[in-house]
Image (tube, rainbow, N blue to C red):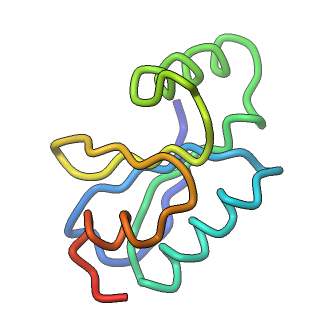
Amino acid sequence: MDFTHMDGDENIAVTLFSLTTCGHCRRTKTFLKEKGIAYDYVDVDLLSGETFTGMYDLVKSYNPRCSFPTIVIGDTKQVIVGDRPDEIAAALELAI
């Protein structure tokens, strides 16, 4: 499954599952970009067929409600659901 990579500080792995139509997802991407955090993301709504099914199942394994954005942080796979810059900053140990 292909993820898009955004350059920045790569001290902690960040993966973002998003939808192109989701305002909360766009705000989360903007927050990570403004903070200079590298992250990988996939816009799930742009996928189809088995690729969509596989990605949907992966998101559901992290977030049973399968809501967006779903952010997975670090080796411990800390999951943050929704537009929560304070929680993301705390997980990444950022000063905001």
Q: How many marks?
A: 0
Image x and y of residue 33, in percent = 52, 78
Quarter that holds the C terminus: bottom left
29 relative position to 94: left or right: right
Q: In the shown orientation, is residue 39 left or right of residue 22?
A: left
Q: Position of residue 23 (x, y in %)?
A: 76, 60
- The quadrant in which residue 42 appears is top right
Residue found 58% across the figure and 48% down from its top: 69
Please, is residue 13 above or below residue 86 in the view?
Answer: above
Q: Residue furthest right?
A: 21
Q: Residue at x 59, y 22 (%)?
A: 56
Task: Reply above or below: 8 against 64.
Answer: below
Q: Position of residue 53 (x, y in %)?
A: 63, 14
* Left or right: where 2 falls relative to 24: left
Q: Is residue 96 above or below residue 8?
A: below
Q: Is residue 92 above or below residue 36?
A: above
Q: Residue at x 65, y 11 (%)?
A: 50
Query: Closest to the observer: 34 or 47?
Result: 34
For this orientation, the residue located farthest to the left is 76
Q: Nearer the viewer, residue 90 or 20?
A: 90
Q: For the point 46% across and 70% down, which residue is it?
A: 85
